[in-house]
Every structure is written in C-alpha cells, then in structure tokens.
Image (cartoon, rainbow, N blue to C red):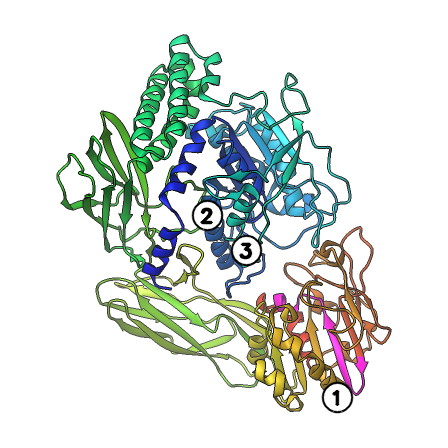
Amino acid sequence: MTPDQRRLMEHAARPAIAELWKALKPLTSVVTVLQTGAHPDDETTQMLARLVFADGARVAYACAVRGEGGQNAVGTEARSVLGALRTGEMARAAETIDTALYWLNEAYDGPINDFGFSKSGPETLARWGHDRLVERLVRVIREERPDIVTPTFLDVPGQHGHHRAVTQATEEAFFKAADPAAYPEHFEDGLVPWAASKYYLPAWSGAGMAYDDDEPPPDATVTVDTGAFDPVLGATYAQIGQWSRAYHRSQGMGRWVEEGPASVALHRKHGPDAIPVEESHPFDGLPVRLRDLGHCVDDVTADALAQADRAVEAALAAFPDGGKMATALIGLIDAVDRALAAGGDTHARVGPRLALKRRQAERALALALGLVVRLEGPREPVAAGETAELRLSVYAGRPADMAITEAALACPEGWPVETLETAPAGPVPAGQTWAIRFRLTIPADAAPTPVYRFRHDPLRPEEPVTGRICLSVAGCPVTLPVGASPSLSVVPPVSVVLAPDGAVWPTDRGAEPVTVTVTARNHGSQARQARISLPAPEGWTITPPVVPVSLAPGASQAVVFELVPAGATAPAGRWDLAPDVTLDDTPRPGQQVRRIEHPHISALTMVTPARLPLLGLDVTCDRSVRVGVVEGGSDRIALWLERLGLSVTRLGPDDLATGDLDRFDTILVGIFAYGARPDLRGANDRLKAWVMQGGTLVTQYHRPWDAWDPDTTPPLRLEIGQPSLRWRVTDEGAAVTLLAPDHPLLTGPNRIGPGDWAGWVKERGLYFARSWDPAYVPLVRLADPGEAPLDGGLLSATVGRGRHTHCALVVHTQLEGLVPGGFRLLANLITPDGRR
C-alpha cells in the first residue's frame, strides 16, 4: 500500500458528519474516567465507547507495558520491535474511541516490560518495581485528574499476574495521588495532589480460554449499557468497541458482534458515603454538566458556567447545521473564558476542567466550520544534522468571519526554524487554503526519535514537532494544534544492519568461518565517507578490522567480515558483536533503523543499538538429517536449524498435498500451524501415515482452538489443557525432573542434564497436554511454585515404525534467546531413533 493509498483509506473512514458528532458529545460532560490495564488490548472498549460517545466523558487509558511479550499474527516483529508495533496499534485503537493514552514504560529496555506470562501479582511487582509502578500511576492520575478510576481486571488467583499487579497498584495509587506526602517531585512539574471520587472494579469474571478466576466477581453496583445504538455512528457501543479492538491485529483481536443487548457490570469499591452504593449510572453523585460546577464557584462564574451549558445544548440542537453550531460554540468558548478569568480558588477548583472543555470546543468549532488543518512533513526519516521542510496549512470549508493571527511550529529547544514562504495573515476565504512553509534544522547531536512516549492525546499532540494555527473567529480566539503527518522521525546520519541477526557456533563446527554482513545506509542528503569496524570479543578473530565505505545520499553498501575462533575450537559462551561507525574521524556505536509498516497503523521508525548476539556452545547434531518444517508463522525454528548446519525444507501446500514426504527423516510442525495452515489440516492423514512408516514427527505447542482435535490431529490421542493458565509453567527457573532420564530423546545425541535447563528465558512452557494415549511417555515434570506438577510438557510415543513427539516447552524462545539447552534439546528432538 502506498502512502497516498493509506491516506485515502483513512480519509474515507472518517466522514466529517461522524467526526463532528464525536467532537460534540464530550462537551456535554465534565466527567473524566481513567481505566488502567497491563497490556495493549486490555481496555474495556465497549464500556469506554459508551462513556465517550453517549455520556460525553473524557476517557483515558493507562497501559503498563507495550505488549512486547505477546504473539504476532501480522508479521515477524518480536520483543521491543513488537512492542513498537503494538504501541502503534494501541494509538489507533484509542483514537477510534477518542481516548487519551498514557504509558507507564517509556524505554525499549525499561523495567516495566512484558516479560512473559505470570501467575503472580507479587512476582510481577517485584520485576517491575512496586514503587515504580505506583509512582507512574500516581503521575497519570495527577496529570489526568479523573473522577473515576477503574482497573480492567480483578486481583484474584487464576488471573494473569500482570493484570493482578496493575489492579493492586491502581488501588494504591488511587489513594496516594491525593496525598501531598506521596511523590512530591511531581509538584516540580506543576502537578498537584488529586483525589478521584470513585474506584470501580469489574463485576464480571476474566475467566475464559486463557484465565480461570478462582473467586467469583464482586456484586454489581452499577451496569453500563453498551447495547444502546448511536444514531449517527450507526452502531451499538459494543460494536464501536470492536471497531477499536480490530486495530489490535497482531493479537488477532476484533470480532463481529450483532446489535442487541449488551452491558458491562461494575462494582464500586471506594466512593463518597453520601452516594448510594446501588447506582443507576457511574456518574451518579458527580458534577456532570458545566452548570453542575457552579456550586463550588462564585455567582459570576456560576452564571458563566450556566451560559456555557446552554451553548452546548444549542450546539447539539443545531447539529448538523455547521453555521448555527459554530455560533453556539463561539458562545461556549466565550463563556468558558469568562469562567477561567475568575482565577484564584475558582481556577484551582475547576480550571483544568474548563481548559479541557475549551480545547474540546475548539476542536468541535473547527469541524463545524469545515476547517482542515494539516502539518505535512517529510515522508522519510530525517538524519541528524540535516534540514526538513514542513508545510502548515488550513483549509476553510465554510464561509465564516475568520482570520489567521499566528502560525508556528513547536519543536525541541535548540532546533532552528526558518520561515520559507507564507501567505499574509488575515481572512481565509471559503474554499481556499492558507499555508506557510518552514525549514527546520535538526542539530547534529539530536537523539533519535523514540517510539515509546509517555502520552498520546490528539487534543494535545506532543510529537517532536507540532504545528499551531491561531485564528480569530468572529472575534473569538481559537488555537488549533496539529501533529505532523507523517510524524517527523530523526535517525542517525549512517545506520547499520547486521546479518545474520544471531549466530551459533557449535563446538564441532570446525574452522569454517561465519560471515557477518554489515550494511551501512546513508540517511542524509549529502555523500558520506565512513569506516565500519566490528571489534572481536575475546577468543575470536574478525577480519578485516576496518572497512571504508562511500555512501551516496540515500544509498546503502554492504561490507563483509569473517568470524572465526582464535584457537582450534570455539570457546563456549555468549557475546554481543557491536559495530562502530566512524564519521568525520569520530567513532560512534552503530545504530540500526527499523521501519515498521502495516496497513492498520501509522508507519513507525525505531532506532536501537546494532547488535549481533553470538553463542558458542557444546552441541552434537547429525547434519545429515533431512528436516521438513511446516511453519505456522509464530517461530523461526527452521532458521535456527539452518544456523546449526542442517539442511531444512520449508513445506508448502503442494509439498504437503502431493509431495514425497519420504525424502524427509523428520518433519517439524511449527507453533499454531494447524490453526494457521488449512493445507496442513488437509494433509494430516498423509502425515500420520508417513509417521507409521517410520517418519519422525515433532509438533510444537498448539492451543485447543488451533484446529487441534485431540482424537484426530495427532497420531495418537493427545488433549491440550485449558484454560491455558492452568496448563503452563511460567517460572523460567522452575525445577525440571526427568521422568525417563535414559529415554532416547534425553540421551542422544546430547545427554540432557541440569545445565540444559539453566538460563531459560520468559517461561518453561505453555499449552501443556492434560491427557494422552498410554503409548506416550512423559519425559519431564515441572511446576510453578506452590502448584501441582505437570507432566504434559514433553511427550513422545512410538507410532508404528516411527515416532511422534509433542513439545509444549518454549524451545523456540530459548533459540531466540541463545540459551544453549534449547539447541541441545532441539537437536535431540529432530534426530531419528536409529541415528542417535
């Protein structure tokens, strides 16, 4: 999809009449709701859509992690790069339901990270840092000043530990945000203590295919109707919530729901005693309309608030007449300004609410007038030390008494801005575009633009560079902020990419060198001369030591290094190869630039240190074994087998349907492949017959819903347990007992011992089998602390003249983490019995 095609599709998906309606609704309420969650896609979208578009609430979602530990159904991004993709998905999901977004982690390698599935809130808090998490949530509460705070999930056994940790921390932050003694450093940033009025828990269970809440949910004290129909948007709020969820495509989210009754039940755990516990609406007892704020201000301000409220009613009554709406909205802004002018205690009590209401009114006014404000910048990333041209424009769609008073860029301190071309300030005729062009100079020492930021709020764009148009509309001052499209991304002048992205050197490899290709790219507009070096770790030799490159603007050049052990054999251990880039005689660590592009998100540019992890390990592997791999798109085991030196064939539909399976000694079925590959399901009888005739089949873990029929999918009956929380071992250091230590899979060609279970990452395994045919031999026993042991993590059976092994251990994760035991176990799994 081209950038223009993407713009056209996004434009078509945002009809002006719907956008105007969505901008009007928040004017009807002064209530702010904050929901907290652990992951992108945890938000209760149907409830938030209802509170925004029906009840006019300002809604914000605070998300702990970026989701870097999740699956990826749309691409190959993993770890922090997957976190960047899911950050982009979360931004689009939030925009769909007009929700502000806060993140508790702003660093690619930050401590509040998605380290994998957890069953324990305390374990999660220990990893994230209890005080760190609470402090971040307190900051969000003080920034957003919500009336209502609600976590997404309950803190009960059987629930994801990340969810439990966020719920625990949210309740603590609910009280600490009001405490002047808590985190006084916030006050240096202009924040003040804030006491939210109500704290709700979900009154519904989070149990399902993944979780199994051990305790029933609390009784509902209020129910939010999400089955109501929005006459302008043409959908129920439950359906609108799914519009939002569909942007979480990497997690397979978004499902069709029919029109009809739907609701979300809540339990009020904390709140004013004066408000009855049983409520008809979460807003009961709160000031809802602007006029409701009059009880805490002087009479003059109260009168202004009442006038503002009448202006809101007039604007709604005038919908969709843009001219009449504009008149009412100008009256609203004027009344809000008079209320804000009161200052003193009045401003302290209601000022932030009124400032928010003014921003919302300005947005609605711009839409009523048919104004289109854009800040267009470079479509490609810009190198530090270069210049970028941006065009700030406003198009007037309706006749109006309107004039430009100011147009400006906001950018980091020390970034010079030059005006290149501008139309004179003054009236903007209907049907005309007023524009100004700027040249921005990015300092040579400017840091790369991060993808991970604290806040995403369309009402307050905070990208590295934003625009601002100031107007006078019938004498009313209006400021319209706008973010750059596409967002300006700063990258290093020269970036590098290393290939492969990881290297494995078995001790029996011999002296054949590993080739490392470093591709340098010039992101600037001028030709550059650079020198690329790849320092060798101790025990290794890399040649040549330095390679010069000459790079034309936008050009890339690949240089090749050879890596060999300094001695006769490779040392065991792990190292990170880190290239240096020398520009103007100044060496600097090499940085990699990744472009993350998918049709459902805005393109993202991610800059990280360039690294190539190297593992030297003691592993014996029969490289004559012929391996076929049925990939499911969720692992790279085929690639790692090739890096071990094996010949691997990736099996396509024709291979499975009619190909000669006898040319393979072993066939390995990837994670989730039965669910992702209809061709595999169609060829399953052929595959089982091949096993009967002597083939070695290895299946990796599957979910019960991945078209896995326990009676017909595997060669012999094998049932996968659910909910998944009950059938996984999340403690990566959990003790492993070998149930059959002399079994062929545990003795050859590598004898598996205690050292092979050391250093595992993320977890031990998931989607363990719960029952199986007696022919299967359980090989390992594992358990999370305090839980009953599970024997269904690694099962193997003789089937006819062949063998089937089902592995629910996360071997693929260990390969990506360069954990030696993962490679040694994999080498055993793919080796036929007669060749150990």
Q: Residue at x 50, y 31 (%)?
A: 57
Q: Earlier in the sequence, mark 1 or mark 3?
A: 3
**Magenta stretch holds residue 804:** yes
Nearer-the-camera pick, 412 or 243: 243
Badge 3 element: loop
Q: Residue at x 36, y 31 (%)?
A: 359
Q: Residue at x 31, y 36 (%)?
A: 366
Amino acid type at image mark 3: Glu
Distance between the alpha carbons at the discs numbered 2 and 3? 15 Å
Please state which of the two labelled residues, at mark 2 or mark 3, is closer to the viewer.
Answer: 2
Q: Earlier in the sequence, mark 2 or mark 3?
A: 3
Nearer-the-camera pick, 413 or 810: 810
Distance between the alpha carbons at the discs numbered 1 and 3? 40 Å
Residue under label 1, please give it: 694
The residue most toward the right is: 774
Residue under label 2, please give it: 91
The label on residue 68 is: 3
Badge 1 element: loop
Few, some or many C-alpha atoms within 10 Å of disc 2 (few <14, some 14-19, many ≥20)?
many
